[in-house]
Image (cartoon, rainbow, N blue to C red):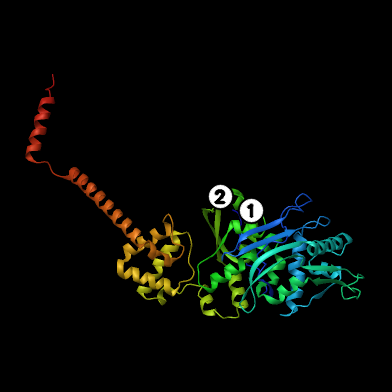
Amino acid sequence: MGTPKQKTERKVIPLMPIRVEREFLDFPLHRLTGRGKNNTLEKIEIEGVDQDGNQLLWRVTANAQYGAPGELAYKLDRLYIDRLLDKAGTKKPKYIPLGTISEIAKVLGRDNSGHSLRQIRNALKQNALAGLEIKKTIILKDGSEDCFEGCFTRYSVFFRGEKLPNGSRADRTWIVLSDPWHWLLNSVGTRPLNYEYLQILPPMAQRFYELVTPKVFGCLKYGRPFARYTYSEFCRNAPQTRYLKWEQVKKQMYKVLRHHKNSGYLESVGYQQFKDEVGRLDWEMQLIPGPLALEEFDKFTRGKVEARASGRKALPQKDELSEEEKKQRELVVRFWKAKGIEPKIFLKKDLKIANELLERLGQEKASFVVEHAATAKKPADVFGGVKYHLTQALDAFEKQKEKHRHHRLREQRRQNTETAPYSQEDLLKNLERFKLKWRPPD
């Protein structure tokens, strides 16, 4: 007999917040897939309108000499430069010393070979020379809106011995923020990320973490059972190739999501297939937060919603609930299980709706209604949406009940026919038929 596999314990990941600007973090600047020169000059472009109907443009043009910013340039930006910007506080300086290339290599976990140092220098040039063309309505620190637009680069880079714009000689590697980017960093709010977690993730999994963190925090803050993020949105903002066949999507996203499941950031991920506005297949990823996400939420929100968050850790024991509360929760659980989800938190408003349904309809009819709402052609996304399916669900319940009634009547008639005793008249008729068929033996 083989040795049974032992369940490996989740590695404890320290919580070290880093705050990065939130207005353009969701937009792609680095290419994290593909290698070689064939795609290095491919333009990144997003154009259209935002969710409020404002005009939106995001275009990144790579430098022909050094190529598009890739994985190393991405790690350099997030793990090194953004860390320095965060340490600078709310008032970012225009001139930022990075240190020597060897010091940068050590932080990024790379060796001190000449090849490695040349790669870091090249990545700095890729970042510095990537041109941005932007038009976007942004929200400033004071809550007001402003239209941020222009064509520029984010910063310039100066290596040791080169002359800085202020006339001095660089004693190490420096970056100098461009005026538009310097103004932006000092004018907009920030978003918290876990620096320790960023360090251990490969680039595409790291990018996924950056993009879904606001969704996961919103899910925990408002007590939703899962966070939503569409596959097409991730492909656009990562960026990565968008596939239209489920087997390709499943394989592609497994490589990204397995890191977050293994770390405990996500407990599980479900998929809901739908078609986008032009008829192409898309998938809504339903992300159920894990213990690491809960720890980050508690730490980074400083306990502001501790009571709500703590409700996700464990369900109260059955003996702690009244019979009415048990029935209410069972109704909510029935709704989410019909959608393939195991709920881990119960909102007061959902339990109130469940109580109203039970009082008005009774256990049997209420159970049918919530399951019907969860599995309808256009299903309810949350438990509160059950009320919009009430009329249709009740009609379906009555039709099903009538169908079952007819079935019972047919079954009862069949059984009565098989078990009913013969009358005297029937016995005489059968006897006559027997006499006609019977012949005495020779």
Of the pair 372 and 90, the residue shown nearer to us: 90
Residue 280 numbered tag: 2
Tell me the residue that label 1 is attached to: 252
- Three-letter code, disc 1: Gln
For the image shown, how many numbered marks are present on the structure?
Answer: 2
Q: Earlier in the sequence, mark 2 or mark 1?
A: 1
Q: Note whether 118 is above or below 329 in the view shown.
A: above
Q: Is residue 336 left or right of residue 136?
A: left
Q: Note whether 409 is above or below 380 in the view shown.
A: above
On the image, the x and y values in percent for residue 79 come to 74, 69
- Within 10 Å of disc 1 (Cα), the crowding (few <14, some 14-19, many 20+) is some
- Three-letter code, disc 2: Arg
Q: Note whether 253 is above or below 427 in the view shown.
A: below
Which residue: 60% across, 52% down? 249
Q: Is residue 245 left or right of residue 350?
A: right
Of the pair 402 and 425, the residue shown nearer to us: 402
On the image, the x and y values in percent for residue 199 come to 72, 67
Q: To which quarter of the image does residue 186 belong? A: bottom right
On the image, the x and y values in percent for residue 361 come to 30, 66
- Of the 4 image quadrants, the one containing the C terminus is top left
- Within 10 Å of disc 2 (Cα), the crowding (few <14, some 14-19, many 20+) is few
Q: To which quarter of the image does residue 231 belong? A: bottom right
Which residue: 54% across, 74% down? 221
Q: To which quarter of the image does residue 265 belong? A: bottom right
- Does dot 2 land on a helix, a strand or a loop? loop
Which residue: 65% across, 65% down? 26
